[in-house]
């Protein structure tokens, strides 16, 4: 879920208007700074989690990658070619408040994924720096301090601005994969030259688990701990706007871009699968198990240890520098993802404070959170692995559910069955990981709680804002208002809650308002009706249609919020005609407090006073503000 565009200081995975696009293989490196950088710590974490069974558990992980996650995200790429990803798919498939709440929960897990990427990558980078033989002795044991420095440096860079990410990522990924390939080939060659190493490993493994079926069973049980190796798929979809498509691509279904994204996902998955299996085998066979434990020589840096042992300190140092650089850049891409994740969803829901639109306050907030997480976990890579895996697995599981719902919507029987099975497998993997290491859920719960609290407070505070992104009057509606403005110099609008829609309704409503509000009999009136839509939406594009119904002129608009929509339409009428309109209401029956709560949830409730307050806040000049009459 993390990337940074080449054309803007803080663009991330959710940027939609891209100045320049690139071939899919170059865009793959934006995924790679996150996905491939996990090689810096994945083999060590796998060894800690699965012990001598690590290669078998890794094979299970690879099968799940190629047969489960890859087909799911190839489908996600097809259905969200603008890079919105699985969260946006679920947002479309699960409307109203239930869908919004589900998205907020997923955002909590996504935030966990992003934040742990920043802190875990910085912690592993510090482990590589401190363990290097050329590192000064005073650095030893200072993992927390070095990690905090890297986090602070990351925040400082984003406070100033960060550009040209795709060029940097291409170099970093190419160099890093080349160095890893050299290390693994040399390590495997050493294993091939000393068959006794494999015999010793297999002998130790069979002494622990003599029955091969038990080995497979244990591998199936422990592989969820290795889920960090699945981290790149959501990112691969998120970077889709950066991919160059075909000249004749349809903007809604760009076949060229979708094809490029599928190549990206498949190539990245195959490359990572090969590295995961070979690195796991090499490190498990060549490194004693005790070295993987906290404080051991391979703790968080298994491949780096092999680089130093078999290729010397100079090559090992080059490998360390490359690893530190790509890990730091993975944290930078995570920060960019966070800076784009918040503006994509929360402001549209009316669930973000005003300062959330600014980059620097968000950077400071995320920086403080990263410092707290580093201190809580004491910059321990293994301790953070569970939280990271939880975030990754929840997002992938949500993607499988989204794809299954899409298949259900399309009535694809094969898709329903296949993706249901994949969803169940990932659900098991997620639950197993949560049970084994609940830290991820605890951190996610804090993020979810924080997001929901901030969202509710912000939604209440912004209840009296104009919410329409745009207001369009169709030709008939424009004729209605311009006719009254030109001929009478006034526009009188009666707010009507739509009911039967027959002549009797409008006759009675007009008579009541003329009697109670003192509208002259010869003065024409226009009815304004707001027909209900999704009340959980905050920002809307309003289209006002003019209808001649039973001899009455009626303006109709669909919206999930009545008072704010009426206010927006009144301002549009004023701006189009130059005449400040008057609007007429009747008092809402019922308890004012319950009506206010009803308004916050359903967008209806106490219409007249809220409309007046929205108008007052939006237009401070009294003479330019539509008058509200209530009877």
Image (cartoon, helix red, strand yellow):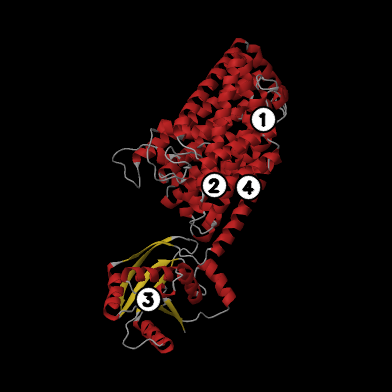
Residue highlighted by disc 2:
360
Give the CA separation, mark 2 to mark 4.
Answer: 23 Å
Q: Earlier in the sequence, mark 1 or mark 3?
A: 1
Q: What crowding class fits label 4: few (fewer than 14 Cα within 10 Å), some (14-19), or many (20 or more)? A: many
Q: Position of residue 602 (x, y in %)?
A: 51, 68
Q: Position of residue 236 (x, y in %)?
A: 47, 38
Q: Position of residue 280 (x, y in %)?
A: 60, 25
Q: Relative to residue 386, is residue 11 drawn left or right?
A: left
Residue highlighted by disc 3:
581
Q: Earlier in the sequence, mark 2 or mark 4?
A: 2
Of residue 276 and residue 381, the one placed in the foreground of this image is: 381
Q: Earlier in the sequence, mark 3 or mark 2?
A: 2
Give the CA separation, mark 2 to mark 1.
Answer: 42 Å
Which residue does the image show at 54% across and 47% down from the upper left? 360
Residue highlighted by disc 1:
50
Give the CA separation, mark 1 to mark 3.
Answer: 72 Å
Of residue 348 and residue 180, the one placed in the foreground of this image is: 348
For residue 444, the mark is 4
Q: What crowding class fits label 3: few (fewer than 14 Cα within 10 Å), some (14-19), or many (20 or more)? A: many
Say whether marks 4 and 1 touch (CB < 8 Å).
no
Say whether marks 2 and 4 touch (CB < 8 Å).
no
């Amino acid at each position: 879920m993390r990337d940074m565009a080449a054309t803007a200081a803080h663009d991330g995975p959710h940027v939609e208007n891209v100045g320049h696009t690139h071939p899919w293989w170059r865009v793959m490196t934006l995924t790679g700074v996150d996905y491939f950088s996990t090689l810096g710590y994945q083999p060590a974490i796998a060894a800690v989690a699965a012990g001598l069974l690590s290669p078998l558990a890794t094979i299970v992980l690879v099968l799940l990658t190629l047969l489960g996650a890859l087909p799911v995200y190839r489908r996600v790429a097809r259905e969200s070619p603008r890079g919105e990803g699985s969260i946006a798919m679920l947002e479309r498939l699960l409307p109203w408040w239930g869908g919004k709440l589900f998205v907020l929960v997923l955002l909590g897990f996504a935030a966990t994924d992003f934040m742990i990427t920043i802190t875990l990558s910085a912690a592993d980078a510090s482990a590589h720096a401190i363990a290097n033989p050329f590192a000064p002795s005073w650095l030893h044991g200072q993992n927390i301090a070095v990690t905090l420095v890297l986090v602070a440096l990351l925040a400082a860079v984003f406070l100033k601005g960060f550009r040209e990410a795709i060029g940097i990522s291409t170099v970093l990924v190419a160099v890093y994969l080349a160095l890893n390939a050299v290390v693994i080939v040399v390590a495997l060659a050493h294993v091939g030259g000393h068959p006794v190493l494999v015999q010793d490993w297999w002998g130790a493994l069979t002494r622990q688990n003599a029955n091969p079926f038990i080995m497979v069973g244990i591998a199936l049980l422990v592989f969820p701990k290795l889920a960090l190796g699945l981290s790149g798929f959501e990112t691969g979809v998120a970077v889709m706007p950066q991919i160059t498509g075909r000249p004749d691509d349809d903007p809604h279904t760009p076949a060229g871009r979708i094809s490029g994204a599928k190549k990206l996902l498949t190539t990245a998955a195959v490359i990572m699968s090969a590295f995961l299996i070979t690195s796991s085998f090499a490190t498990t066979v060549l490194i004693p198990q005790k070295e993987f434990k906290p404080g051991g020589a391979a703790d968080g840096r298994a491949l780096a240890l092999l680089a130093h042992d078999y290729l010397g300190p100079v090559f090992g140092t080059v490998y360390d520098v490359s690893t530190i650089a790509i890990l730091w850049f993975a944290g930078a891409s995570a920060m960019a993802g966070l800076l784009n994740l918040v503006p994509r969803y929360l402001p549209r829901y009316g669930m973000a404070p005003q300062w959330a639109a600014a980059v620097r306050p968000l950077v400071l907030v995320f920086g403080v959170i990263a410092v707290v997480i580093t201190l809580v976990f004491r910059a321990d890579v293994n301790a953070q692995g569970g939280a990271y895996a939880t975030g990754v697995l929840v997002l992938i599981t949500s993607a499988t559910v989204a794809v299954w719902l899409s298949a259900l919507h399309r009535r694809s029987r094969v898709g329903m069955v296949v993706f249901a099975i994949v969803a169940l497998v990932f659900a098991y993997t997620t639950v197993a990981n949560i049970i084994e290491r609940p830290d991820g859920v605890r951190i996610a719960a804090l993020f979810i709680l924080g997001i929901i609290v901030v969202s509710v407070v912000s939604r209440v505070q912004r209840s009296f804002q104009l919410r329409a992104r745009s207001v369009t009057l169709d030709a008939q509606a424009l004729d209605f208002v311009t006719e009254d403005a030109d001929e009478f110099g006034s526009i009188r609008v009666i707010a009507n809650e739509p009911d039967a829609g027959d002549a009797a309704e409008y006759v009675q409503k007009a008579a009541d308002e003329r009697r109670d509000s003192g509208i002259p009999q010869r003065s024409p009136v226009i009815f304004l009706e707001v027909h209900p839509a999704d009340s959980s939406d905050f920002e809307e594009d309003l289209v006002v249609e003019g209808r001649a119904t039973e001899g009455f002129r009626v303006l109709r608009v669909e919206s999930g919020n009545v008072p704010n929509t009426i206010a927006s339409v009144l301002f549009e009428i004023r701006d189009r005609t130059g005449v400040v309109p008057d609007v007429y209401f009747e008092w809402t029956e019922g308890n004012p407090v319950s009506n206010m709560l009803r308004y916050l949830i359903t967008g209806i409730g106490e219409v007249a006073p809220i409309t007046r307050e929205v108008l007052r806040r939006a237009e401070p000049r009294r003479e330019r503000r539509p008058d509200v009459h209530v009877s």
